[in-house]
Amino acid sequence: MNISSEQEMMEFGRGFAKKITKPAIIELVGDVGAGKTTFVRGLAEGLGIKEPITSPSFTISKSYALPGGGRLIHYDFYRLPEPGIMVDDLVENLNNNDNIIVIEWGESIKEVLPEKHIKIEIYYTEEGRTVKL
Ligand code: ADP
Ligand code: MG
């Protein structure tokens, strides 16, 4: 699917929110600046979260209450090639069926990612971005 602007990526995220049910695990794959966090901003809006979503690249994780209970937890392991104690936090959250988990740069934690998860790949193209499910 072609996504030609930041607004379209947000819209894709909002639409995606309607298609998923808790529990959900989404792995986002794409280079720096591809639009992973932009997708999460749209997703959060679609899930009814009113708080602004900011990138967790410095804090590694950010967590938001979902209107119906449970949490949206957004991870970015880019700066954490050795996730260490964060793995325990991640596993605990992955085991809670009330959560929606989104992971950017999940290479270092792939051993704990359940095989059955949603993977979204975002590529740069001349027209903007291509999203592959
Ligand atoms: P990532 O989390 O993958 O590093 P971000 O979502 O933080 O990327 O940033 C993507 C940047 O690219 C934003 O500044 C956004 O405005 C810009 N952008 C331009 N075109 C697009 C597009 N088609 N889809 C998503 N983001 C886009
Ligand atoms: Mg990001």
Image (cartoon, rainbow, N blue to C red):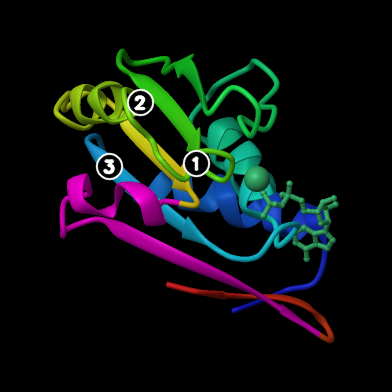
Q: Is mark 3 within 8 Å of ligand 2?
A: no
Question: Looking at the image, is mark 1 or mark 3 nearer the viewer?
Answer: 1
Question: Looking at the image, is mark 3 or mark 2 nearer the viewer?
Answer: 2
In the displayed structure, 55 sits above or below 20; it is above
Question: Label 1 to label 3, Cα distance in Å?
Answer: 18 Å
Q: Along the horizontal axis of the image, is 119 left or right of 15?
A: left
First along the sequence among labels 3 and 2: 3
Q: Along the horizontal axis of the image, is 23 left or right of 38?
A: left
First along the sequence among labels 2 and 1: 1
Q: Residue at x 34, y 33 (%)?
A: 100
Question: Label 2 to label 1, Cα distance in Å?
Answer: 9 Å
Residue 36, image x, y percentages: 62, 52
Numbered range of the magenta stretch: 106-125
Q: Circle 3 is placed at which residue position? A: 24
Q: Along the horizontal axis of the image, is 111 left or right of 77?
A: left
* Label annotation for residue 86: 2
In the rendered structure, does residue 123 fall within the stretch colored magenta?
Answer: yes
- Quadrant in the picture for residue 44: top right
Q: Circle 1 is placed at which residue position? A: 77
Q: Residue at x 14, y 28 (%)?
A: 95
Q: Are marks 2 and 1 in contact (CB under 8 Å)?
A: yes
Name the quarter where the N terminus is drawn: bottom right
Q: Residue at x 47, y 45 (%)?
A: 81
Name the quarter where the C terminus is drawn: bottom left
Q: Is mark 2 within 8 Å of ligand 2?
A: no
Q: Residue at x 30, y 16 (%)?
A: 70
In the rendered structure, does residue 116 fall within the stretch colored magenta?
Answer: yes
First along the sequence among labels 1 and 3: 3
Question: Label 3 to label 2, Cα distance in Å?
Answer: 19 Å
Residue 47, image x, y percentages: 48, 31
